[in-house]
């Protein structure tokens, strides 16, 4: 058995996967933060239950196993009791998740520049105090110093531009909100894309052709639904539809970690980075991407499948 890479942060610990027992047909949704995780969870839920009126909030139907805002025993009990086809969320790269041929692994990529913009908004909407309260109740806070939390910060708060440069150049193994982690995660998916049970989707493709991508997802999961039914379900997975039901669709709304649940769904567009990145930022970003990503991976991240010249899905 291949030894798993352990990924630790304030939010998650991939060691929580150790000993997890998969069932045949399980689905693992593995994406970096702000690449379309919740969107993919919503799509999978609609296909599995074949209804827009889901029996529970998405976060309860599709638990985040390695997130440290709930005791592991509680998460395992929830998953163990589920009778429906299970679909589990993680922000752990695929080399940190157990591999099982009976399981489908779904990855979602996005232009990293849009990830940076979305991530900045995401952090501004997070109630840090409430987050730490929930973490303390679930797993404690004794490891925060080890994880680099609580170290003295700069004398003055960083500007948005300085935060963006930090996101681009951060080399820490403990930060999941960085260009390095985003590319590293998606590299583990890209390297496994030829496996029949690993499927890569792209945020831009979901925006461009939601119905077509949902049909592709159904085929990947061996879910047989007529196109007109998939179209009806897809209507419940648009940005506007999800934002209107944010309490049921956004993650962790039951523990009140968001300042505004609806703001979890910010803009739902691509190309936001053009309003934020300066020419100097782009030069630093392009240099950094050349260090982190193979050329074909970088092309896919910036274009998606539908616009890629060599795409198998054109």
Image (cartoon, rainbow, N blue to C red):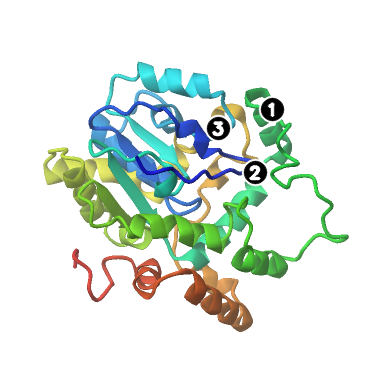
* Mark found first going from the N terminus, 3 or 2: 2
Q: Could you say where residue 280 lies in the image, as x and y percent from the top left?
A: 63, 82
Q: Residue at x 51, y 60 (%)?
A: 115
Q: Let me know if residue 186 appears in the view.
A: yes
- Asked which quadrant contains residue 145, the reply is top right
Secondary structure at badge 3 equals: helix
Q: Could you say where residue 259 lies in the image, as x and y percent from the top left?
A: 65, 40
* Mark found first going from the N terminus, 1 or 2: 2
How many neighbours does mark 3 have within 10 angstroms: few (below 14), some (14-19), or many (20 or more)? some
Q: Residue at x 48, y 24 (%)?
A: 75
Q: CA distance from mark 3 to mark 2?
A: 11 Å
| Disc 1 versus disc 3: nearer the observer | 1
Residue 300 located left or right of residue 262: left
Secondary structure at badge 1 equals: loop
Residue with the mark numbered 2 = 126
Q: Residue at x 70, y 40 (%)?
A: 128
Secondary structure at badge 2 equals: loop
Q: Could you say where residue 129 lies in the image, as x and y percent from the top left?
A: 73, 36
Q: Residue at x 23, y 35 (%)?
A: 102
Disc number placed over residue 140 in the picture, else none: 1
Q: CA distance from mark 1 to mark 3?
A: 20 Å
In the depicted view, which residue is nearer to us: 311 or 12?
A: 12
Q: CA distance from mark 1 to mark 2?
A: 19 Å
In the depicted view, which residue is nearer to us: 127 or 30?
A: 30
Q: Quadrant of the C terminus?
A: bottom left
Q: Looking at the image, which residue sits at the far right?
A: 155
Residue with the mark numbered 3 = 253
């Amino acid at each position: 058995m291949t030894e798993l890479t352990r990924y630790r942060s304030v939010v998650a610990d991939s060691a929580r996967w150790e000993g997890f027992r998969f069932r045949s047909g399980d689905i693992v949704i593995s994406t970096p933060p702000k690449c379309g995780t919740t969107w993919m969870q919503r799509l999978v839920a609609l296909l599995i239950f074949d209804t827009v009126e889901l029996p529970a909030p998405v976060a309860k139907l599709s638990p985040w196993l390695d997130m440290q805002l709930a005791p592991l025993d509680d998460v395992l009990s929830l998953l163990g009791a589920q009778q429906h086809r299970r679909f589990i969320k993680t922000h752990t790269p695929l080399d940190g998740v157990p591999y099982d041929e009976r399981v489908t692994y779904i990855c979602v990529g996005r232009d990293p520049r849009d990830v940076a913009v979305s991530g900045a908004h995401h952090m501004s909407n997070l109630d840090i105090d409430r987050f730490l309260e929930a973490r303390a109740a679930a797993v404690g806070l004794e490891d925060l110093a080890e994880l680099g939390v609580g170290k003295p910060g700069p004398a003055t708060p960083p500007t948005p531009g300085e935060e963006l440069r930090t996101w681009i150049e951060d080399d820490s193994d403990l930060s999941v909100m960085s260009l390095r982690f985003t590319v590293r995660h998606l590299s583990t998916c890209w390297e496994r894309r030829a496996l029949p049970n690993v499927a890569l989707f792209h945020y831009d493709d979901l925006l461009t052709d939601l119905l077509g991508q949902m049909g592709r997802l159904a085929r990947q999961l061996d879910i047989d639904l007529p196109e007109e039914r998939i179209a009806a379900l897809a209507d419940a997975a648009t940005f506007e539809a999800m934002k209107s039901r944010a309490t049921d669709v956004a993650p962790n709304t039951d523990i009140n970690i968001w300042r505004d649940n609806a703001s979890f769904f910010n803009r739902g567009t691509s190309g936001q980075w053009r309003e934020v990145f300066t020419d100097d930022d782009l030069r630093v970003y392009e240099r950094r991407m050349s260090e982190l990503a193979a050329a074909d991976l970088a092309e896919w991240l910036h274009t998606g499948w539908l616009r890629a010249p060599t795409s198998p899905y054109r």
